[in-house]
């Protein structure tokens, strides 16, 4: 069944106008400087001390968040699979609902909880306990990242787990395997595409965020995303901002290529 | 031969649906037993209860004299070949076959040897490193067999393993299974809806329907002496009619008297309403007027081995006789049908629900 | 026993996900601005929210952009799937690769790149640039939802229709389109969701005068309109709840009867 290729024309227009040209633009700014000459300064700037520090912190926080999400999500998917907790559809519904709340509102909710005059401190005070300084710490940022991205880790892993043919698990038991062995040798390997999907959907946004670090880190937690954003909004140095962005882009592409190596079957399981 | 497996008074329901209604089965060592029946008869459920994947609502499962009803599947000394093979897609053929051995902690060189032996047994020598996705349906089926066999179980459970294969392959595999049975000398419990498979491979066939055992016996007994209309109809081609015993060894079918060999001796008293089975191949075709009754041929099909014809007799009741014969007879011609007394199988009619209820209470 | 811990775990995670939201909802009814002291039940923040031109404007922008972007992206994406299906394998691979780029790129890079190219071409930032950007990142989701449904089974149905005498157009409308519909619907839904929730790309492509809910929250969150935002959260939560309930009512009904 073939239809005219012309149907894809508007799409191609969008690809060119919305993807190709913008990337060329950012490349242009990345490799030029204010006075019009070609330069690599914008790129090498990433390797300066304070940029590397920010990058390092971003990597650390993103990794920690991804790990926490993974550790929290995996048992969740397993338990969901086994349990009749109102059956699957209801639980998915409950998981998706927070995702439909605007993610800034979700982050704002943690501000409300963590601030010095916020809810948690209010409760502590009422109990006669001292107030805690929870805001503007890397911990708060990690908390925000985990909170915002956890459903994105749970869903693909859950999808992958559900796709596992129950006969495979029965066969493993039939061959004498104990529960732990079955998890290790059968369930876990078959979840890998889901895990890869989940990691992709958490690590990359966590690495490049500036919103969460702004709202919960208050300028004290400076991530690479913040620095890039500031180059555009505060410093109006589009050249430097673009250069740094290009480096991030390459970084992300490398991470994704590495992650794809784990998903040999090529099935992502988010959609 | 000693009794190896016993299912006693097994009952199983799923919600409102009573799938097994008091099943008792005894299986001897080294027997090839087939559970045969249509979809939904309970045969797969029975197998799964044996394998430990389902628990019966009541009743016991005995293995070698021991009660294993509540023993989980990974501790039972039997292995299953699943209907869709259930091969681990992320492992190679060799790793699949080795799975059960590695679970037991066998050392690698022994594992390698056994895997090699297992694959050789199913004619897949040298396929250790292939990916499952590269194997054809028939090959996957054999990998599933090898994976079960290498664990040297006392009993092999097979859940319609040949269903997905084409005819020729299925026939080949049937020979393979019988050969394996002789080579391994273990008990095979086989589930299928294909009566040809059941007849070719089994020592004993258990025919099931609606959660009950209809008949148990050798393939010959099941085929030649079905005990009721269901079994008669399920196995082989048949002409099944209602009849009434006239007197000892004479049954009236559609107003025509047929001499038979069943009668008072085996509980078919005069006046009793019965079901009668006559196999198409047992109906002899003679010139019109020279048989027990005359019939007109209404259609004819060439099957290859023989002709299959339908004929309408000018008797009470509207019955289309199914005939099988090496010779062909023209459509529209009238022939005489004759059947020897020993080829008429008289069967008790199935009990009505009230009669059953009374029986159970007793 | 195992089940108990399992279910406990699910409850804990659910609590983790919902407590912050519930906190906002509770606070939205608080008379005082304080986050730690609940003085009196009051609907005044709802009043403020509904009277705030700022908030209402942002709401209108958010939903109109989401609706338009989802609609347009769905049309373009579906058309693309139809057109791509007829191309040779190598072209298909290239186009699908290009299609995936906005999804794989971090939002911040996509947002910056779009902003720069708008400005380079002298296009001033505003509603239209936001819309264009949203359409751009929604199209891949539509294509990924619709494409799998353009498979061999659909091919066979199309051929069956032709065999029965239908014209290509008729066969397409009556046979192929219904097959694609579930994918189109989920693509639309996904686009709508992604657009409503977007912040970073909108942040870079909006210019100065215009706000969506996300950008409004970001810019105003340190100033005092907070409590109105709690009211906003509650309203959005309720809308999401109702929409999801309606969408899932069939599933939930089936499960109730099955259980």
Image (tube, coloured by chain):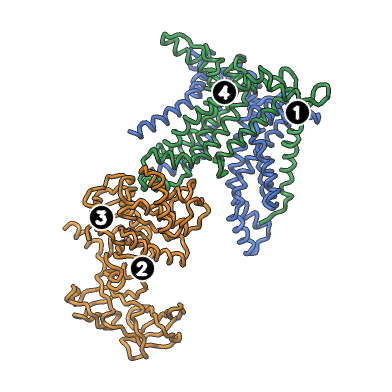
Chain colours: A green, B orange, C blue
**Residue, disc 4:** A60
Query: In the image, B302: left or right of B222?
Result: right
Q: Are marks 1 and 4 in one subunit?
A: no
Tell me if residue B53 comes above or below residue B34 in the rendering.
above
Disc sitting over residue C116 in the figure: 1
Q: CA distance from mark 2 to mark 4?
A: 67 Å
Q: Residues within 10 Å of mark 4 (few under 14, many from 20)?
A: some
Disc sitting over residue C194 in the figure: none
Asked whether residue A146 appears in the rendered view, the answer is yes
Q: Nearer the viewer, residue A175 or B20?
A: A175
Asked whether residue C201 appears in the rendered view, the answer is no
Question: Which residue is painted at 63% across and 60% down in the image?
Answer: C159
**Residue, disc 3:** B5
Counting residues from the start of the chain, the first of labels 2 and 3 encountered is: 3
Q: CA distance from mark 3 to mark 1?
A: 77 Å
**Residue, disc 2:** B200
Q: Residues within 10 Å of mark 3 (few under 14, many from 20)?
A: many
Image spot of residue C214 (x, y percent) = 62, 25
Q: Are marks 3 and 1 in one subunit?
A: no
Disc 1 is attached to a residue of which chain?
C
- The local secondary structure at tag 3 comes to strand
Q: Nearer the viewer, residue C57 or A177?
A: A177
């Amino acid at each position: 069944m073939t239809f005219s290729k012309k149907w894809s024309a508007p799409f191609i227009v969008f690809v060119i106008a919305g993807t190709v040209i913008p990337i060329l633009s950012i490349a242009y700014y990345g490799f030029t400087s204010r006075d019009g000459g070609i330069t690599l300064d914008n790129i090498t700037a990433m390797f300066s001390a304070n940029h590397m520090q920010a990058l390092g912190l971003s990597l650390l926080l993103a990794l920690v968040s991804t790990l926490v999400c993974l550790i929290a999500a995996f048992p969740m998917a397993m338990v969901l699979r086994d349990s009749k907790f109102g059956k699957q559809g209801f639980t998915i519904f409950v998981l998706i609902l927070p995702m439909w709340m605007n993610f800034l509102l979700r982050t704002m909710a943690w501000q409300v909880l963590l601030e010095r005059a916020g809810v948690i401190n209010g409760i502590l005070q009422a109990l006669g306990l001292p107030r805690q300084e929870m805001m503007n710490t890397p911990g708060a940022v990690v908390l925000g990242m985990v909170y915002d991205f956890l459903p994105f880790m749970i869903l693909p892993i859950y999808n992958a787990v559900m796709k596992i043919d129950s006969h495979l698990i029965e066969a493993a038991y039939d061959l004498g395997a104990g529960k732990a062995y079955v998890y290790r040798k059968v369930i876990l390997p078959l979840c890998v595409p889901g895990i890869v999907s989940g990691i992709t959907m958490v690590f990359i946004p966590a690495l490049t965020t500036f919103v969460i670090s702004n709202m919960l880190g208050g300028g004290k937690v400076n991530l690479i995303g913040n620095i890039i954003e500031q180059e555009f909004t505060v410093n109006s140095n589009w050249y430097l901002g673009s250069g740094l962005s290009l480096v991030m882009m390459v970084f992300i592409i490398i991470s994704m290529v590495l992650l794809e190596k784990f998903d040999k079957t090529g099935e992502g399981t988010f959609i | 031969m000693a009794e190896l497996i016993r299912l006693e008074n097994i009952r199983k329901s799923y919600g409102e649906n009573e799938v097994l209604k008091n099943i008792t089965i005894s299986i001897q060592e080294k027997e090839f037993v087939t559970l045969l029946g249509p979809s939904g008869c309970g045969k797969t459920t029975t197998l799964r209860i044996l394998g430990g994947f389902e628990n019966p609502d009541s009743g016991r499962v005995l293995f070698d004299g021991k009660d294993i009803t509540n023993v989980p599947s990974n501790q039972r000394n039997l292995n299953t070949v699943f209907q869709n093979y259930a091969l681990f897609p992320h492992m190679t053929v060799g790793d699949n076959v080795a799975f059960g051995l590695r679970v037991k902690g066998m050392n690698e060189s022994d594992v390698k040897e056994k895997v090699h032996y297992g694959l050789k047994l199913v004619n897949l020598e040298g396929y250790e490193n292939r990916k499952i996705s590269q194997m054809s349906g028939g090959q996957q089926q054999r990998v599933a067999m090898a994976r079960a066999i290498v664990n040297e179980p006392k009993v092999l459970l097979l859940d319609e393993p040949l269903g997905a294969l084409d005819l020729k392959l299925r026939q080949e595999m049937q020979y393979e299974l019988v050969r394996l049975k002789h080579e391994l000398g273990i008990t095979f419990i086989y589930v299928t809806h294909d009566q040809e498979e059941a007849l070719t491979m089994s020592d004993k066939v258990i025919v099931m329907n609606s959660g009950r055992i209809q008949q148990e016996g050798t393939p010959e007994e099941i085929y030649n002496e079905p005990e009721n209309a269901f079994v008669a109809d399920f196995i082989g081609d048949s002409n099944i009619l209602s009849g009434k015993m006239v007197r000892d060894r004479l049954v009236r079918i559609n107003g025509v008297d047929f001499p038979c060999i069943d009668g008072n001796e085996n509980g078919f008293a005069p006046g009793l309403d019965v079901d009668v089975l006559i196999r198409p191949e047992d109906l002899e075709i003679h010139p019109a007027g020279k048989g027990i009754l005359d019939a007109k041929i209404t259609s004819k099909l060439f099957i290859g081995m023989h002709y299959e014809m339908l004929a309408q007799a000018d008797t009470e009741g509207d019955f289309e006789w199914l005939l099988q014969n090496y010779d062909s007879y023209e459509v529209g011609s009238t022939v005489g049908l004759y059947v020897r007394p020993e080829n008429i199988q008289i069967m008790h009619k199935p009990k009505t629900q009230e009669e059953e209820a009374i029986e159970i209470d007793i | 026993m195992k089940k108990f811990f399992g279910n406990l775990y699910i409850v804990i995670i659910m609590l983790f996900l919902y407590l912050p939201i519930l906190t906002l909802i509770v606070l939205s009814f608080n008379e005082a601005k304080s986050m730690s002291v609940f003085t009196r039940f009051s609907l005044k923040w709802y009043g403020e929210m509904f009277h705030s031109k700022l908030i209402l404007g942002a709401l209108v922008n958010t939903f109109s952009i989401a609706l338009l972007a989802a609609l347009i992206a769905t049309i373009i994406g579906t058309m693309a799937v139809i057109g791509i299906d007829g191309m040779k394998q190598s072209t298909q691979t290239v186009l699908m690769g290009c299609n995936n780029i906005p999804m794989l790129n971090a939002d911040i890079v996509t947002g910056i790149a779009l902003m720069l190219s708008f400005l380079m071409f002298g296009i001033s930032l505003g509603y239209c640039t936001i819309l264009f950007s949203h359409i751009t990142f929604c199209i891949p989701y539509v294509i990924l939802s619709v494409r799998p449904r353009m498979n061999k089974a659909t091919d066979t149905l199309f051929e069956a229709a032709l065999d029965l005498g239908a014209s290509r157009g008729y066969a397409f409308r009556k046979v192929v389109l219904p097959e694609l519909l579930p994918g189109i619907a989920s693509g639309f839904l996904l686009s709508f969701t992604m657009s409503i929730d977007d912040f970073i790309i909108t942040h870079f492509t909006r210019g100065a005068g215009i706000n969506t809910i996300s950008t409004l929250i970001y810019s105003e969150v340190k100033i005092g309109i907070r409590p109105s935002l709690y009211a906003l959260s509650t309203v959005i939560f309720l809308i999401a709840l109702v929409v999801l309930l309606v969408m899932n009512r069939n599933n939930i009904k089936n499960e109730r009867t099955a259980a």
